[in-house]
Image: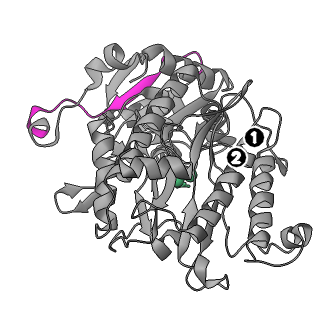
Amino acid sequence: MLGLHVYEERRRRLRASLPDNALAIVAAAHEVIRNRDAEYPFRQSSDFWYLTGFTEPDAVLVMAPNQPDRLFVRPRDPNQEVWTGRRLGPERVHAHLGIDEGYPLDALPGHLAELLADVSWLEYPFACPFSTQVVDTALKARASRSRRHDLLSHRVDLSRHLHQSRMIKSREEVDLMRDAGAISARGHIAAMEQCAPGMTEDQLASIVEHTFRMQGSPAVAYQTIVGGGDNACILHYIDRSDRLVSGDLVLIDAGCEVEGYAGDITRTFPVNGQFTTPQAELYDLVLAAQTEALNEMRVGKTIKCFHQAALRTLTQGLIDLKIIKGSLEEALETKQYLPYYMHGTGHFLGLDVHDVGAYEEQKEPITLTAGMVITCEPGLYVSKRSDAPARYRGTGIRIEDDVLITAKGPEVLTGLVPKERDQIEALMRGA
Ligand code: GLY
Ligand code: MN
Ligand code: MN
């Protein structure tokens, strides 16, 4: 957990954005039942985690200007805790989380009834079903108590301020993301070192994830993608059921979480440790596109700039390799690259792997600002069914790094894992 002052400062900023007669409500996530007594692994709601540092399910943060912050949590219960684990309990909220007041969850309706009596502005994250449920229940209860339906004139999406804050990472957040980047990189290195033909995609994934855990990360930031050969052309391929074949490339897109902050790395390498000539041609093209794109990830440039840089390089390369036809400008205009490159070149990264933050403001692409963390992930996907020359088919390549935007230029947080062909081949040879 970060220092308590970090969470207090985040709540202070949110409180300062509220008008006088406002109330803000942010709920934690619930556990999701998988079947009978088994649950899916619990992951805290990112907005709630950002504001509280609290990782238990079933809690609600209530804030209002000029009022103490209140956190409603599951009560201590020795009988339940024997089964499902320790609980913080309301008594320890202040000491452990620095939040002014802790209450048991069943006190929430009473507090909300009182607080909502003369509130006209209610903020909560609209996209969060748990927060919406708390708000709807409280408003229904209020409606049944009072005929004054006119009091609440504003329901406002709390995300508009909060997500602006989450988009710009503080020094403490960058440190965690550096750790997430380094641990994620070690997972990829282990995969390159241990990959062998005949292994299943899932076995290779287990090497990556084992390394994450052994390095201290308890969770993946998203389901690990390992696709050999043509499977690498399925962007979010999570089946991982095939065996890896000598002569194919394998694409791994995997990242771990550190205190909730995500790493997101993709590397592509030969299953047998040596690139063939057609693989090398495509690979070097994707790497060149990433180099061009990275160079555009600078303060003051727009988010569109680095995508355009990648697109131009990839499209020119596809023409040179005779995979598509025409002049560069024509090919870009008619989007001839689309069968081979169909995704954006980057996304915000943070507590969510596809993190919050607006990509456009008034229909214009936003300008890059110091403190943003954005992925840079060009790729080429030449599937077996494509019209490309036969030697390129069945090959998917993506190279993805996590980039901190700084006043001095782009800083790659995931540089530990090699991406030059000769470095990859040397690592796989054990050199
Ligand atoms: N790992 C998902 C992505 O790169 O967007
Ligand atoms: Mn990504
Ligand atoms: Mn990725």
| Residue drawn where x is 54% and y is 23% of the image | 11
Distance in Å between CA atoms under marks 1 and 2: 6 Å
Q: Is residue 320 above or below residue 408?
A: below
Q: Residue at x 82, y 79 (%)?
A: 325
Residue 46, x across and y down, in percent: 48, 40
Task: Give the answer, above or below, for where 212 lies relative to 201.
Answer: above
Q: Do tag 1 and tag 2 residues touch (Cβ < 8 Å)?
A: yes
Across and down, in percent, residue 4 comes to 43, 16
Q: Is residue 413 visible?
A: yes
Which contiguous range is marked in magenta?
65-80
Tell me the amino acid under the disc marked 1.
Answer: Asn
Circle 2 is placed at which residue position?
291
Q: Residues within 10 Å of mark 2 (few under 14, many from 20)?
A: some
In this view, the residue in front, 89 or 45, is: 45
Q: Residue 74 in magenta? A: yes
Q: Total of numbered circles in the picture?
A: 2
Q: Amino acid at mark 2?
A: Thr
Residue under label 1, please give it: 295
Left or right: where 302 falls relative to 347: right
Q: Which one is in front, 66 or 117?
A: 66
Q: Position of residue 394 (x, y in %)?
A: 53, 77
Q: For the point 76% across and 48% down, which residue is it?
A: 306
